[in-house]
Amino acid sequence: MLTITNLGIAIGALWEVAEWTAGIVLSTEVIESLNDTIIDLIIDSLGAAIAALTSFWTLQEWMRSSAAVGNQASIANGSSDRT
């Protein structure tokens, strides 16, 4: 979960650096204010945390369904051994 969260935050930070660089190179005002940057980073962090939680939940569901399939296969194999 930490890896996914950190990756999302890092991508957001790189985007902010790209916006700042574009503003300097193009001599335009891409970044409206410091508040704009901070709000963007907060939203990036929230999105990354939601992505991490979603990935964790999906992994748990996948593991649960894989275990259920494995248990059914064990039951099926066990019943054929008895006959």
Image (cartoon, helix red, strand yellow):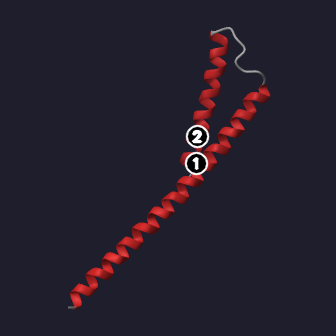
Q: In this view, does 71 lie to the left or right of 7?
A: left
Query: Residue 10 is drawn in which quadrant?
Result: top right
Q: Furthest residue to the bottom?
A: 83
**Whole-percent x, y for residue 17 in the image:** 63, 24
Q: What element carries label 1?
A: helix
When the figure is inspected, residue 59 is found, relative to residue 31, above or below; the finding is below
Q: In the image, what residue type sits under mark 1? A: Ala
For the residue marked with disc 2, what is the amino acid?
Gly
Mark drawn on residue 51: 1
Q: Distance between the residues labelled 1 and 2?
A: 8 Å
Point 62% across, 33% down: residue: 12
Of the image marks 1 and 2, the number of the one nearer the N terminus: 2
Residues at circles 1 and 2 in contact by the CB criterion of under 8 Å: yes
Q: Position of residue 14 (x, y in %)?
A: 59, 29
Image coordinates of residue 3 in percent, x first then y, are: 54, 47
- The residue shown at (35%, 77%) is 72
Residue denoted by label 2: 8
